[in-house]
Amino acid sequence: MTTPIPDQALICSARGCRAPAVFQLRWHNPRLHAPERRKTWLACPAHRASLGDFLDARGFLREVVPLPESPTLES
């Protein structure tokens, strides 16, 4: 993932999706990364489960947290 331009919304990491992200899926591959290292995929509500299931099936998913200041999760 590239660093976004500040005035751009963060978008979902699912292929072809352009929806705003509201979740961070933090993961690591234990064969490649030190235990404390985390990589991050972003997810919209529609892709949170499928991206999480993909990572979880491989044993990579460590945590799912809301993106800070996500308007859909602030209530």
Image (cartoon, rainbow, N blue to C red):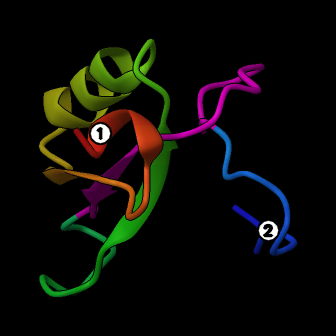
Judge whether 60 appears above or below 32 on screen: above
Residue 26, how many percent across, how many down?
28, 59
Sequence order check, earlier mark of 2 and 1: 2
Residue type at the position of mark 1: Leu
Q: Is residue 68 left or right of residue 13?
A: left
Residue 56, how many percent across, how many down?
16, 33
Q: Which residue is more in the foreground, 41 or 31?
A: 41
The segment highlighted magenta reads 12-29
Q: Marks 2/1: CA distance?
A: 21 Å
Camera-side mark, 2 or 1: 1
Q: Which residue is more in the foreground, 23 or 59?
A: 23
Is residue 21 found inside the magenta-colored segment of the image? yes
Q: Is residue 7 left or right of residue 75?
A: right
Residue identifier under label 2: 4
Disc 2 element: loop
Q: Overall secondary structure of the magenta stretch?
A: loop
- Residue at 67 percent across and 52 percent down: it is 10
Judge whether 63 appears above or below 38 on screen: above
Judge whether 14 appears above or below 68 on screen: above
The N terminus, quarter of image: bottom right
Judge whether 21 appears above or below 67 on screen: above
Residue identifier under label 1: 73
